[in-house]
Amino acid sequence: MVTATDPERSFGPVACGSVKLTILGGGGFRVPLVYGALLADHAEGRVTAVTLYDTDADRLTAVARVLADQAEGVPDAPSVLATTELDEALRGADFVFSAIRVGGLEGRAADERVALDEGVLGQETVGAGGIAYGLRTVPVADGLARRIARLAPHAWVINFTNPAGLVTEAMSRHLGDRVIGICDSPVGLGRRIARTLGADPDRAWIDYVGLNHLGWVRGLHIDGRDELPRLLADPELLGSFEEGKLFGTDWLRSLGAIPNEYLHYYYFNREAVRAYQDAEQTRGAFLRDQQEGFYARMKDPATPALPTWDHTRAEREATYMSENREVAGAGERDESDLESGGYEQVALALMRAVARNERTSLILNVRNRTTLSVLDADAVIEVPCLVDANGAHPVAVDPLPYHAVGLVTAVKAVERAVLDAAATGSRATAVQAFALHPLVDSVSVARRLVDGYTKAHPGLAYLNRA
Ligand code: G6P
Ligand code: MN
């Protein structure tokens, strides 16, 4: 096994005065998206050196090959160094991007399957599946955060590791406000609404708040006017865009807000569970098979790297959340939606604002402070923030209506139980985490879920204390 920097996986000179970005989970399938965004950035203060860290040397090799292809012919391409040594990867980092998947896609598939077999939602981040994923991921994220605090105390940490809100909160216990969680779903939603209204998405102020994958757009302001009421009042317009089809216009008008697409799992839980149970494969199993194929093919040095990755990605994105869309008759995601920039654009915008003090506003996962009065100051929430060289500052928002307070506080209580269970190894606390979730309908189900998950995941063996 390769344990140190391998010149075969690395390319490009490291310039002095360079800005170093370390990617944890550097062998991940989405890393070329991040590198592609960096390649397009030629401005002063841009990232010039990328270090990929991963526990899996073969995946690192595969992804480094794709990156080398992408860098071909780009004169100022950021250098790339790949390593399986965490400390080496962290030293001197200005930014750390965390995008790991503890247990891999096999783990995700098991998260989904165990829940569905018990008749509750099996999904990557929401409900029982998300709790299992959190219980597996928090101890690892906690270890990484401690190491970063030690070796790169001045680095800004951008967390994309799911469940992103919970994991960001776990890391913030060691890194404070230096860790910022990101997700592409709020910005995607804001852009879809703006486009539907015929407005320029870059000029819109999106009044959005909640937890990660659990938030609502309550207004969309352009030139000092809230345009959302115009959308809600026009059934044709409302039914023409994705969330309109997903949730139905009547329900959106009742809510008076546009929920994040992940709220479909709450508002249409029965339908979602049934559709997932009827599906041939879970999303995790689909991605596992697809990506296994990619990494296996990449072991052959004759496999052309970039075209193989690109082809696989297109297929993956075409089916993104497709089960939900089918259930709701929402169809496939719009092409223009994928182009508007996913999480790599959010990450780049965040790095730019911090590195160059280019003030901007982004919807991010940060500590609440006093933003939502129903939550304590350390609770990580998802909220518009002003970003500059001093980090992300959440803006004041209107309070949530009670129905949203109910969901947000219930799910935050679940997240806190997950954090406690991870810290103490208490099985009873893990049971509590499942039992308190609004999408788990019985304490007995919660107990069986803990049994099922500890059997399925060796990484949950730590849950052995009463
Ligand atoms: C969106 C969410 C991410 C999530 C991803 C799932 O981008 O914001 O948090 O990980 O979808 O996509 P996948 O292709 O893995 O199902
Ligand atoms: Mn997300």
Image: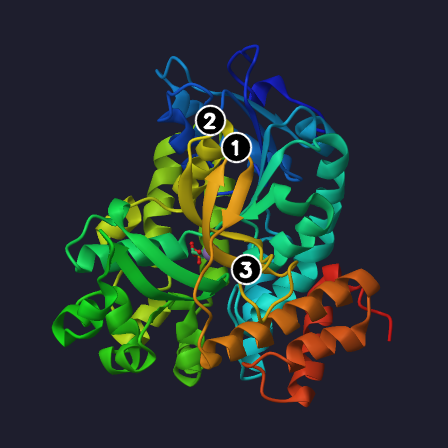
Q: In the image, what residue occupies the spot 31% across and 56% down?
A: 190
Of the two numbered discs 3 and 1 in the rendering, the one whose residue sits closer to the viewer? 1
Circle 2 packing at 10 Å, graded few (<14), some (14-19), many (20+), is: some
Residue in the foreground of this view, choosing between 404 and 40? 404
Q: Quadrant of residue 76?
A: top left
The percent position of residue 433, horizontal first and vertical second, equals 68, 75
How far apart are the two marked residues, 3 and 1, measured between alpha carbons? 21 Å
The percent position of residue 8, horizontal first and vertical second, equals 58, 19
Residue for badge 2 = 356
Residue for badge 3 = 381
Residue for badge 1 = 389
Of the residues under marks 3 and 1, which one precedes in the sequence?
A: 3
Q: Quadrant of the N terminus?
A: top right
**Amino acid at the residue labelled 1:** Ala
Helix, strand or loop for disc 3:
strand
The percent position of residue 209, horizontal first and vertical second, equals 45, 63
Q: In the image, what residue occupies the spot 31% across and 64% down?
A: 219
Q: In the image, what residue occupies the spot 50% across and 33% down?
A: 354
